[in-house]
Image (spheres, rainbow, N blue to C red):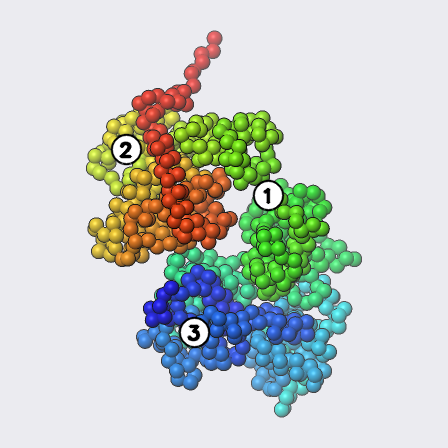
Amino acid sequence: MLDKVTRQKLVVIGNGMAGIRTVEALLERAPDLYDITVFGSEPYGNYNRILLSPVLAGEKTVDDIMLNTVDWYEDNNITLRKGETVSMIDRRTCEVVTDAGDRVPYDRLLIATGSNPIMLPLPGKDLPGVIGFRDIYDVDRMIKASTDYRSAVVIGGGLLGLEAANGLMKRGMNVTVVHLLDTLMERQLDPVAGGLLRKSLEERGMVFKMPAQTQAILGADRVTGVRFGDGTELPADLVVMAVGIRPNFELAKKAGLYCERGIVVSDTMQTYDGRIYAVGECVQHRRQTYGLVAPLFDQAKVCANHLAMKGFATYDGSVTSTKLKVTGIDLFSAGDFAPGPDKEEIVLQDANRGVYKRIILKDKKIVGAVLYGDTIDGPWYFQHLRDGTDVSHMRERLVFGAANLGEGGVSGQNSVAAMSDETEICGCNGVCKGAIVKAISEKKLFTLDDVRAHTKASSSCGSCTGLVEQVLAFTLGGDYSAAPKVKPLCKCTDHSHDDVRRVIVEQQLKTIPAVMRFMEWKTPNGCHSCRPALNYYLLATWPGEYRDDQQSRFINERVHANIQKDGTYSVVPRMWGGVTTPSELRAIADVAEKFNIPTVKVTGGQRIDLLGVKKEDLPAVWADLNDAGMVSGHAYAKGLRTVKTCVGSEWCRFGTQDSTGLGVKLEKFMWGSWTPAKVKLGVSGCPRNCAEATCKDVGVVCVDSGYEIHFAGAAGLHIKGTEFLTKVETEDETLEVIVALTQLYREEGWYLERMYKWCDRVGLEQIRKRVVDDIANRKALFSRFAHSQQFAQTDPWAERASRGVDRNEFAPLAELELA
């Protein structure tokens, strides 16, 4: 644990949901890195601003919506300066200055000042009784007004305005909603859905004046009415302006930070001053500002990652969905539903039931959805929208939802059962169905409050509460002891990957047919999914005993080269740690000329790729490279691919350790090993991270006092930074930890499961416990890996070039002459 004296100082301006969610995520990642001070202008802890509408409606109390009480700050050693306002940021001295003149220093500053309600510049806007709807103070004033007065006008027919109007109506006031346009919630709804919503609210007693232009607010000592552009007037004892919000960035602008419509931030949530971060409604990212909670929480995760000095996550923007928090009205909207010549619409309308669905497609994908009256499939449509799914194969029945497509396995079953585990249930907190089901099952949860406490699902806006309750009911069923169904390895068996691996060991099964017979495979010879998986599991379990089945490998692994789109192959010789010599380069050049290889390219993993090699030439190409002392780079393998290095302390003036030498040592020890999926390593000689170690499967960052080991990163289709595993002092310890980690992955990973997915499934703490904390287990894992390497480190190129192994694989088909 860092000493208090050596901790950095983090100051957070803003005690709202985005800022404190960032702090929560930071405490999970680096609990001892900072002394944290939070400034909040309100006299409370952190509360759920989204649930102000239910408080106004009398459905919740202020205590109900508190997310972090004052005790939470004390428990986490956070200094909360509530009721205090920061008036200036002194970037020169790295201090913030309060209204009282106090100067508080920072090493890192997080601005989370949120937004302010837009108050229309109308005559009379400053009269008592004219308020916005933004915080607890506004709610208290509205509640007090509802006890003393009878008539209210809400200006704004958007999400916030309708929720304010509903709350005041429930408090007994006569409410008129004034809206500039002729469609309610026009940013989220099309005219048809807007009309259905208006009808439902009118049946409840809400009155609308729309389209209408507000001209002035009337009154002398207090508001008495509203005048409109057409000359008409409406009496009012209370006027609530809910016409929108404006990012609150004046403090940042005064400090000289670059601002446009908000504080401009990068994908890492940093401002133009690298020491200052910003999240929430006050920021502008890629020209977008956001007012919904889900994007703000996405930003918080990324910001926390960088404050924790992980330095890898990026925020790429958000796709948002909306639900109205008015009890009894089901409304869902997501994406882009504006008409266009390149779009097509699928519409279902049942006037008697008050159901309306409109799905908008573009290029065979869902780009927008509006649901009214029946919103159960909202998360399902939203998932397809976010994933960019090609829905052309289900187009005819798409509008009827997941259950009617048989997505859950039985057509017509409960929609929640039909949802995949990846379907997002709680958009605010990014919680998927699978995470909720897992928490219910593993932690024996029985109530909605339990689920909220463990997953955060339904703990923000609450609009997903019904869905969470359905997941709870679906998972528990009539018999809690029934475990959720495990995904089988493939269609040939009902057994999972874990079952197969366990049985292979327990029953001493050492051939693919033996596994299939014992586990009663449904197909006699398996398929393209299970045969390679079984081949790997047997190879990893019985090194030296099991004979690798080449016919159960994909083409690249069978011929030890990567097939290209024209049927030729690419050859990548291994260069230890990315280091080469003039003689190796000459040999590569000679091979390229001799075999007319059209393209020679440097790869991202510091190797040289020869592209366009004919299949029948592969053995001869390998023979020439072998003669120059080069072996297969295994660029085709579910195994160790490359170890990328920087030049480290040998040449670089910033290098702290010999990263090149360590990379070479790691690669020479680990090459040839087979793993569930490809594995890439990186070794950087200092925290500047030139070898990009923090986006690799395993990465080492050298520091003055030793070696930081990271793992579970990815930089392909999925972008993910690494998790910090441990720090060690010597190269030998580094080798031991990385080898043990890789062996644990080899023994427990599912075939084709990348290391970062394995980490997500198993859990970082479990892996750390078994590789870092349990030294005896670590040494045992290392020993098992070293044993298997006796049988793995045979160059497949040399075998095929000099001994003619599998020569039939490379012989061209005979040309037959027709008689």
* Quarter occupied by residue 243: bottom right
Say above or below: 453 vs 242: above
Which is more toward the observer, 724 or 601? 724
- How packed mark 2 is, by other alpha carbons closer than 10 Å (few <14, some 14-19, many 20 or more), is many
Q: Label 2 is placed on what type of residue?
A: Met
* Quarter occupied by residue 29: bottom left
Which is more toward the observer, 710 or 244? 710
Residue 188 seen by the camera: no
What residue is shown with label 2?
A: 630
Q: Label 3 is placed on what type of residue?
A: Thr
Rendered-image quadrant of the N terminus? bottom left
What residue is shown with label 1?
A: 486
What residue is shown with label 3?
A: 37
Q: Earlier in the sequence, mark 2 or mark 3?
A: 3
Say above or below: 189 vs 232: above
Tell which tag, 3 or 1, sits nearer the viewer: 1
Residue at screen point 55% across, 80% down:
121
Residue at screen point 40% across, 33% down:
562
| Label 3 secondary element | strand
Residue 574 seen by the camera: yes
Separation (CA) of disc 1 from disc 2: 45 Å
Q: Label 1 is placed on what type of residue?
A: Val
Tell which tag, 2 or 3, sits nearer the viewer: 3
Tell which tag, 1 or 2, sits nearer the viewer: 1
| Label 1 secondary element | loop
